[in-house]
Image (cartoon, helix red, strand yellow):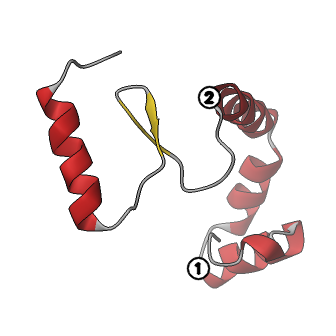
Amino acid sequence: MFANHTKLTRENILAWAKEFGCNMPKFTADLDSAKTKTQIARDLQQGEEAGVEGTPSIFVNGKHYNGSLALQPFSEMLRAELKGPVYH
């Protein structure tokens, strides 16, 4: 879905779910459920409040990480964070 983010339509999502072998009655029911819609709305609101502008977005110790996701720079940042205080 990430690779096809410009093609995220209900029709495509249902086609991909079927292609992946999902139980379609359950998938469709879950997709349309009030619980799912509430969770998505909550996630969007939290993302907006945190300053998320796209994906992927990574937070470490409550700080938005905007650097490279390549292993070397990302692991260096994680090591530095592990040496400092941990925020909750």
Contact, CB < 8 Å: mark 1 with mark 2? no
Give the amino acid at mark 2. Answer: Ala
Give the amino acid at mark 1. Answer: Phe
Numbered circle sitting on residue 50: 2
Q: Which residue is drawn at 65% across and 84% down?
A: 19
Q: Residue at x 25, y 46 (%)?
A: 77
Which of discs 1 and 2 lies nearer the camera? The answer is: 2
Numbered circle sitting on residue 20: 1
As drawn, which residue projects farthest toward the left?
83
Observer-nearest residue: 20 or 48? 48
Numbered circle sitting on residue 39: none
Q: Position of residue 83 (x, y in %)?
A: 12, 29
Q: Position of residue 47 (x, y in %)?
A: 66, 34
Image-quadrant location for residue 55: bottom right
Q: Is residue 55 above or below residue 17?
A: above
Quote the CA–CA distance across marks 1 and 2: 33 Å
Observer-nearest residue: 76 or 34? 76
